[in-house]
Image (cartoon, rainbow, N blue to C red):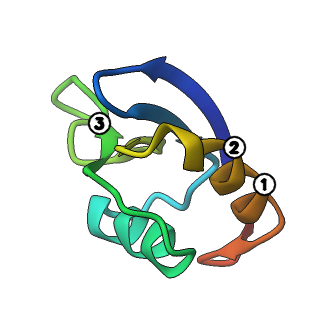
Amino acid sequence: MKLLLVEKSRPGMKLYVGNVPCSTTGADLKSIFGECGRDVSSARVTYGNDLITRRQSKGLGIVEIPDKSAVNYTIEDLSACLFNGRKQ
């Protein structure tokens, strides 16, 4: 899984989460961040936007973490993990 800081939102921060399996849901993302002890405001997976791909995940998502100070630790902690068989 690839983690990048996307946006500083008020009061938290949004992270881009890439290279996730197509079967991953927002609940899965919330769960793995929770296992690392991170509080997650929201987590969603991005899907296609046309008739053919709208039910298929694009393999990326956005996770919002309310604690700005925990974002760098989150990126470090999750960068070495496996998630659903993929290196993060």
Task: Tell me: residue 10, above or below residue 14.
Answer: above
What amino acid type should be assigned to the residue bearing mark 1? Glu
Q: Is residue 12 above or below residue 18?
A: above
Q: Where in the figure is residue 84, as x and y percent of width and height?
A: 59, 77
Disc 2 residue crowd, few under 14, some 14–19, many 20+, Cα 10 Å:
few
Can the viewer see residue 88?
no
Q: What element carries label 3?
A: loop
Given the image, on which type of amino acid does mark 2 rest? Asn
Q: Nearer the viewer, mark 2 or mark 3?
A: 2
Q: Spatial distance from mark 2 to mark 3, Cα to Cα? A: 33 Å
- For marks 2 and 3, the one nearer the N-term is 3
Question: Element at badge 2?
Answer: helix
According to the image, label 3 marks what residue? 53
How many marks are shown on the rendered structure? 3
Element at badge 1? helix
Q: In this view, does 17 lie to the left or right of 58?
A: right
